[in-house]
Structures are given as structure tokens and as C-alpha cells.
Amino acid sequence: MMRLVPAALKVIPFNAKGRVISRPHTAADDAHYWAEQAAGIAARQDIACFIRIYDHYAPRLLRYLLGLRVDAAQAEELVQESMLRLWRRAESFDPNRGSLSTWLFRIARNLYIDGRRREPAGRLVQEDVESLQIQEEDCNGGTVENQADHAGLARAIDALPAVQARLIRMSYLEAKSHSEIAAELEMPLGTVKSNLRRAFARLQAGLKGHS
Amino acid sequence: MNPRHHLDASTLIGYSAGALPTGFSAVVATHLSICSQCRARLLDADRIGGLLVGQHDGAALSDGARADILARIAAAEGPQVAQLQTAASSDRLDPGQLPAPLRPYFGATYSALQWRMIGPGIHHIRARNVADGHLMLLRIAPGRSVPMHSHGGNELTMVMQGAYDDSLGHFAAGDVADLDCDVEHQPVTSPGVPCVCVAATDLPLRFSGWLARTLQPLFKL
């Protein structure tokens, strides 16, 4: 069944309006902090910055990939490959247009999908690399995600109705297919999908600051 | 391109999470390659994923992982200016070349496809290297109706050439039909050129029409 996510509970409570946020790392502060570390890599090949990002995000990416049921050795290799990409391509990360967390998530996910697609034929297909790059380019060229958006999304996730929050978490953190979720929760597949649709609409509103 | 039928939000979330079966992933990537609207929606979905994965507790890497990555970045040429390729990002379907995400399964060009007839006016090619579910190309002659069918699971179809109509509307090149399990439909292809689609299913289709006996073995019923 669903695993609780303790870290998620640290996000500012939804109804904490007016309360002074004294915690050193809000979602927005985090985004800023990590963007600075990435900038350090891009500007001066700063290994200390790289290590800070690595120590924080590599275990999280690994956890995500293990949730996709990638075997441990392969998952770790995908993490290393993602981090190598960060090192080599830190300049293409634009802190004004998306969080580092999203950027790394996309790289790891794309490498995973790319590897799975390549696997049956057992060879690297150049098109896969190209499509990966297009998607990364898009990531930086899409709508602007500023730090307020990031905090708005965090609040919107906390404010989701319990069922929707659970389905979103099962989708991302356990990488359950909709059919698997439906079976596990004994919920019709159509209900799973309609709840995900509603959750997505709410979270998009949160991203745009309407939460 | 400006497709009129787009990916369902639940499908985008599944793709964003990396949780879609291989065939669905390929159809989604194909649509994304020509639809800027869905790429923007995917970015929203990825922000949700990025935030959740960032908030989540990590899992410990093996003991040597940190030393390994340090050795790799020392050996790497250092940060590089990204050489983004724009040539493939044409945002439209090429009449001669298959969309890049489908090439690992079906090859690069339409002219090299080896179609198999499975009924009057209906040809198909099934991707062999898909273990979880089915991925296939379908080519249906103009002005023809495909047997009435419903789906035990999910079906995701994208039109690449030609067009068809069914009770859900008109589907032209670039459009996706992202169907729930309980939809029963009977597509009729438009006159003019054959309709070429790529389709992914996770469970066998259930045909109730006149081609049922011919088609069912292909879907392992």
C-alpha cells in the first residue's frame, strides 16, 4: 500500500498563512540554493558545488528509479549518468526557467525511457539522443517557472484531496501504472484516471499561482 | 502542427513518471515530437515529479559511487556548451520518414515498411521488440470502416497519415485517440489517402465485428 513520505510533510502547511516562515529551507529557498550550486558548476567547474548536488539528489534519483523497478546496479548507473550530464551540461540549466530538481528528474526519466527503448535492439539509436536533447531544450524553453511557482506547487500538492494526493504519489514515487493502482486500491480504472485528471488540473493551477 | 486531439492528463502523468508500458511511451513520445501544447503540459507534469522526488527521502548508493562519479567527472572534458540539435525538432510529421521515437521499432522510412494484410484494405506491422503490451502500425485503405471494437485495457492511437472519423470526432495527422477501457468505437477512414496510425494497447482488443476471426489471433485472443 501507500508509503508515507515524511519529507513531504516538511513543506509549509497549506493553512499557514500569515505565519512567519522561519525554517531555513522553504521550497522556494531550496530552488534558489540549488540553482546557485548548478551555477557554480557552469561558471567555474566547482567540484564542491557538484558534490553538494550529488549528495542531495543522487540518492533521491536512485530512490525514484528503484520505484520504477529498475534493478539496483542499473538504477545506480542511470543516476551516475544523470549526474555526469549535470557536470557536462550545467550551462544549459537556466535557473530562471525551472528548478534543478525538475531538470534532474527529467534527465533521469529520459535516460530511463531511452535505455528501455534501446534495450531490445541492444544498440544506441541516435534519434533517441536527439529526442532527449529536444526535450531538455524544451524544459528550458517552456513556460517560466519561478520560485513562487515552485512554492505554489508544493502548497497545491499538500492541499490535494487525500485520494488524489495518494494517486499522484503512487504514480510518481512507486511508478505504478493506472491499472496497477486501480487493482491495488480496488477502484475502477476510469475513476483512477478521472481523479488523476482532477489532481493535475489543481496542480497546474498551483503552478500558475492560483492555488 | 496543431493537433486537435491531445493526450489525456493521466497518460501524461504516466509518461512523466516513467510508468507507461514501452508501446504507450513510444506513442506518447511521437505525439510530443509534434505537439508543443502537450510538451508544455508534460513540463508541468515533470515539475510535479521533480518536486515529489526532491522531497522524498533518498536511497543509499553503493559505497564506491561517490568515488566513481568523481573519477568520471575528472575524466570528462568538463562543462561544455550544450550542442542542442534543432534539426529533428521540426514539429511536423515527415511524409517519408517515420517519427524518430518509432524508428527503433519500425525502421526509418515508410517505404521500407513490410506491411502484412490482415483483412480487406487493412494492413499492419507489429513491433516485435515490445515485451509489455503491443505496439503496431496500421494502414487502412481510404473510406473503410474498421470493425467495432472495445478495449479490455487502454489503447493509445496516433494518426500519422490520412484521417478517420468515429463517434469521438475527426482524427487527422498528429491527433491522438487516448481511449478508456470502456469506449466502443468504429472508426471510418476518410476518402483520399490511406490512414496510417500507430497504436499501443496493454490488453487484447475485443472485436465484435465482421473481421473478428481474422483479427483476433493477431491480438492473441
Image (cartoon, coloured by chain):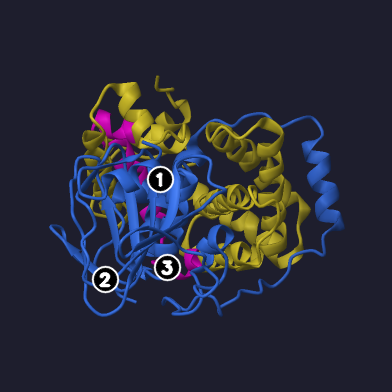
Label 2 CA crowd tier, 10 Å (few <14, some 14–19, many 20+): many
The residues tagged by marks 3 and 2 sit, at their Cα atoms, a distance apart of: 30 Å
Q: Residue reaching furthest left?
A: B167
- Display colour for chain A: yellow
Residue B214, x across and y down, in percent: 33, 47
Residue A141, x across and y down, in percent: 46, 70
| Quadrant of the image containing the N terminus of chain A | top left
Specify the subunit that label 1 lies on.
Answer: B
Amino acid type assigned to the residue bearing label 1 in the image: Leu
The residues tagged by marks 3 and 1 sit, at their Cα atoms, a distance apart of: 41 Å
Instruction: Tell me which chain appears blue.
Output: B
Which residue occupies the foreground of this view, A106 or B86? B86
Identify the secondary structure beneath mark 3: loop
Q: Tell me the residue that label 3 is attached to.
A: A142
Q: Are marks 1 and 2 in contact (CB under 8 Å)?
A: no
Picture residue at 49% right of the left edge, 39% below the top: B132
Q: Nearer the viewer, mark 3 or mark 1?
A: 1
Q: Are marks 3 and 2 in contact (CB under 8 Å)?
A: no
Q: Tell me the residue that label 1 is attached to.
A: B218
Residue extent of the magenta highlight = A138-167
Q: Residue B174 carries which label?
A: none
Residue B111 in sight in this render: yes
Q: Tell me the residue that label 2 is attached to.
A: B163
Amino acid type assigned to the residue bearing label 2 in the image: Ala
Label 3 CA crowd tier, 10 Å (few <14, some 14–19, many 20+): some
Kindly report the secondary structure that dominates the magenta region of the rendered protein: helix
Quadrant of the image occupied by residue A58: top right
